[in-house]
Image (spheres, helix red, strand yellow):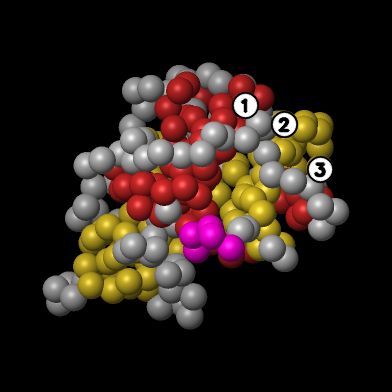
Amino acid sequence: MDDGGSAVAAPAPLTTIRTVAQTGSTNADMAALARTGLGEGVWLRAERQTAGRGRLGRSWISPPGNLYASTLVHLRATDPVPATLGLVAAVALDEAVRVYARDAPLALKWPNDLLLGGAKLSGILLERVEDAVVVGVGVNLAHHPDLPDRPTTSLADHGDAVTPGDLADTLAETFARWLATWRSGGVAPVRARWLDRAHPTGTALAARLPGGDVLAGLFAGLDADGALSLRLADGGTRVIHAADVFQV
């Protein structure tokens, strides 16, 4: 499969990383900065968060030693569907982590997880702020929480050491490059890379839908706009645009 790296992209913008010792939430801070007219290319990284959050209103446990960082994308009229920025962030994060964990069994899982050995290593949270999208990333580098509904892990558990600052520097570069690809080449090259880095087609998944129903099936790829395709037991395919997804 073409990994998407051959797409012609505009030069990536210069990036700046602002680091603070502690904040409530880097996403909340970046949202406030977006309203003041902050441009693209700036990342905010915190050594510790006191009110970190993930998808669906979950809290994100944020002890020192892990990566907590957010950036901002201003939407343009010619940009692809904003929701596909989740794919951009995922492929950029996967590429950045592989710099420090080359032999680790990493895999992307829809909609926003990077897995290591089948356990959750990181998460991505997109939040719309007027004409912009805040992209937040959390990665378990030194620690990981114990969650009741899914296995979790950290890079340290697998013998890979990287500082939050080093990973932030690398992620800022890979995200800028994939953002430029998304703008110049559309969703297709990003989707191709995502599929190349995802768990295999046919992986058993369970999707908890917004209403609470759980739908079981096999991973059948992504549609053109990045929605999950799930092959059901009756042979049909269900396209899912919003759900909490687990490997089973």
Residue 13 vertical placement versus 71 (above, below) = above
Q: Nearer the viewer, residue 84 or 180?
A: 180
Tell me if I can see residue 51 in this picture.
no
Q: What's the CA distance linking mark 2 and mark 1? A: 7 Å
> Where does residue 50 sit, x and y in percent of width and height?
78, 46
The amino acid at mark 3 is Thr
N-terminal of the pair, mark 2 or mark 1, is: 2
The part of the chain drawn in magenta is 77-81
* Marks 2 and 1 in Cβ contact (< 8 Å): yes
Question: Circle 3 sits in a helix, a strand or a loop, which is it?
Answer: strand
Left or right position of 19 against 173? right
Question: Circle 1 sits in a helix, a strand or a loop, which is it?
Answer: helix
191 inside magenta stretch: no
Question: Circle 2 sits in a helix, a strand or a loop, which is it?
Answer: strand
* Label disc, if present, on residue 17 of the rendered structure: 2
Q: What's the CA distance linking mark 3 and mark 2? A: 15 Å
Residue at which label 3 appears: 23
The amino acid at mark 1 is Asp
